[in-house]
C-alpha cells in the first residue's frame, strides 16, 4: 500500500486510477510469483508486460 501511495505522488496525475492499476498489477505479480515458486516455472519477461 505504501508503494501505491508513493507511486501516486511520483508518477500519476489521476491518483485513484493509478492506485487501482498498481494494486491489480501487484496482485497479478504476487500470483505469478506464487505459481513460479510452486511449480518451478521460468517465466519470460514479456508475460509480465501486457
Image (cartoon, rainbow, N blue to C red):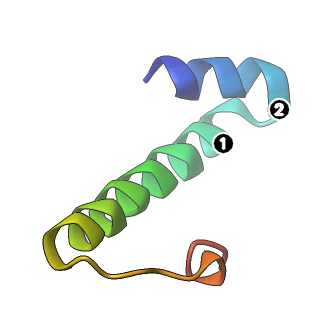
- Nearer the observer, 18 or 35: 35
Where is residue 46, by image quadrant?
bottom right
Locate residue 35 relative to residue 27 in the image: left or right: left
Q: Quadrant of the N terminus?
A: top left
Q: Quadrant of the C terminus?
A: bottom right
Q: CA distance from mark 2 to mark 1?
A: 8 Å
Residue with the mark numbered 2: 11
Element under disc 1: helix
Give x and y (percent) for residue 21: 57, 52
- Nearer the observer, 17 or 49: 49
Which label sits on residue 18? 1
Which label sits on residue 6? none
- Nearer the observer, 40 or 15: 40
Give x and y (percent) for residue 14: 77, 37
Vertical placement of residue 20 versus 37, above or below: above
- Who's the residue at 82% across and 32% down the image? 11
Dot 1 crowding, Cα within 10 Å, few <14, some 14–19, many 20+: some
* Farthest residue, direction left: 38
Locate residue 49 relative to residue 44 in the image: left or right: right
- Nearer the observer, 34 or 19: 34
Give x and y (percent) for residue 30: 33, 54
Where is residue 7, by image quadrant?
top right
Looking at the image, do the residues carrying marks 2 and 1 touch, with CB atoms under 8 Å apart?
A: yes
Vertical placement of residue 15 versus 49, above or below: above
Amino acid at each position: 500500500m505504501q508503494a501505491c501511495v508513493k507511486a501516486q505522488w511520483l508518477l500519476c496525475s489521476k491518483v485513484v486510477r493509478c492506485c487501482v492499476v498498481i494494486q491489480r498489477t501487484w496482485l497479478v505479480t504476487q500470483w505469478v510469483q506464487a505459481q513460479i515458486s510452486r511449480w518451478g516455472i521460468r517465466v519470460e519477461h514479456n508475460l509480465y508486460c501486457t
